[in-house]
Amino acid sequence: MHAVAAISQSALAHNLSIVRKYAPQAKIVSMVKANAYGHHLELAKPLFTADILAVSELSEVQKLRELTQKPILLLSGIFSENDLHEAIQLNCQIVVHDITQLEHLNNCKSPIKVWIKVDTGMYRLGLSNVQLQQSLSQLQNNSNIHIECIMSHFACADEPEHIKNTQQLKYFNQLNTQEFPQSMANSAAILSLRESHFDFVRPGIMLYGVSPFASINQQLLPAMELSAPILSLKSVKAGESVGYGATWQANKDTTIAIVGIGYGDGYPRHAKNGTPVLINNTLCSLAGRVSMDLICVDVGKINAQVGDRAILWGNDKLRVETIAAYSDTIGYELLTGVSARVTFTQHA
Ligand SMILES: *Cc1c(COP(=O)(O)O)cnc(C)c1O
């Protein structure tokens, strides 16, 4: 009797096929960082059929390497010669995004594939244009280093009309690195900015069935269904309040279901009164504050029993995008925030 995240293998495979449909000419980098956006690497294997897989940290490369022999890209790159040795041993490709990383590569004696990340206006990771030219000449001096791709990242791709998208794309094109494969597109750019697809696309959130935009995308299928059981039912009289801080009051006599999930499981504490919860195929509303282990749901309009399962997100009728909107966050944060207390299983 506790919270379960059921991961749908067929939804993951379907979402990957949608990426192929949008970017048929490009190779696909499945972004499986943060434990496959919280879905657990070992349950995300359908995504391993992409051309290459990417994670943020060396510790993630180690875990992923135990599951697959596919090419792996290390997004943060290396910060010491030890890191470099480990990356070579794990047979992974590395991103160079900061010039201090070059010194560790200087006397690299084994073959390694390098992606060079350029900052085209996000001012997060990436080399300036001048640093790019310097790095190219330095890296090309070492015959063990193969430059696999020149990459950059959009700051505002989730707002397709934002001027920054075309500015960044223009800057990227003016780098004159067309002799190398190129990569810019995340999920939002895959769906909305064809000219950014280049040679490798880097889908993340859309693989998990979640729209990168404010609106839901019906072509994508949610891969994670989060559910929890009703532990108790309460009759509440009009005027009575429910939960910590007594922030919700019954405006008529009703029944409240106490559901076994809370912020200790990764359900957002900031979910507002009225956030939808799907019980017995009907959308009901959150009543009162989310506590660590429990939430309270007004089930006055349905027939609910102890043991019935409430779906918190990941169903056609209730997507994580909706819960994100009710709790002032984004689907990415909710998916990656499901805690270790929740049992992960393959969806039947
Ligand atoms: C995480 C990440 C992506 C994927 O972004 P989504 O918005 O989830 O598609 C792409 N590129 C880089 C460099 C990333 O770190």
Image (cartoon, rainbow, N blue to C red):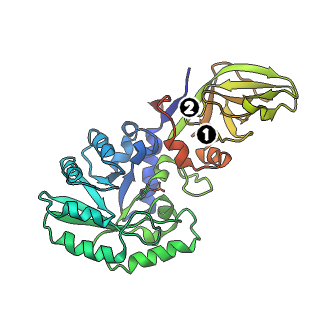
Occupied quadrant, residue 177: bottom left
Q: Position of residue 281 (x, y in %)?
A: 67, 33
Pick whichever, 272 or 166, lies toward us.
272
Residue 268, numbered circle: 1
Q: Is residue 261 above or below residue 114?
A: above
Left or right of 252: which side holds 297? left
For residue 179, say whether it is visible: no
Q: Quadrant of the N terminus?
A: top right
Residue hosting label 2:
264
For residue 104, say whether it is visible: yes
Q: Amino acid at mark 1?
A: Pro
Taking the image in four quarters, ligand 1 sits in the one at: bottom left
Q: Amino acid at mark 2?
A: Gly
Left or right of 213: which side holds 88? left
Occupied quadrant, residue 231: top right
Q: Secondary structure at mark 1?
A: loop
Mark 2 residue CB less than 8 A from any atom of ligand 1 = no
